[in-house]
Image (cartoon, helix red, strand yellow):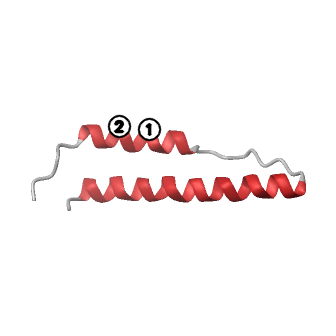
Amino acid sequence: MDVWNLVIEAFRLLVERDTILSERLGKLEEENGLEITDESVTQSQLQELVARISAQIPPSVE
């Protein structure tokens, strides 16, 4: 696995983490009537970045 594949995997993990955190924040908002809207990077933006990086990297030959 080369460095770029590791970078892509790191971004995928960030997307998964962002999804989990967003779900937890949504639950807290619902339970407590809070409104938490200060998210600097959304899940869709991270997914788009992963797709763009993946498109730029040729398939690895192993």
Residue 20 location (% of width, % of height): 60, 59
Left or right of 15? Residue 25 is: right
Residue 40 location (% of width, % of height): 62, 45
Q: Residue furthest left?
A: 61
Give how far apart the Cα atoms at labels 2 and 1 are: 6 Å
Residue at 32% x, 42% y is 53
Q: Could you tell me if the residues under marks 2 and 1 are in contact, i.e. CB atoms within 8 Å?
A: yes
Residue at 50% x, 52% y is 15
Please give the residue where the numbered disc 2 appears in the rendered image. Answer: 52
Which amino acid is tagged 1?
Glu
Determine whether the residue tagged by mark 1 lies in a helix, strand or loop. helix
Quarter of the rendering occupied by the N terminus:
bottom left
Task: Please tell me in which quadrant of the rendered image residue 17 appears.
Answer: bottom right
Which amino acid is tagged 2?
Arg
Residue 48 image label: 1
Task: Please tell me in which quadrant of the rendered image residue 61 appears.
Answer: bottom left
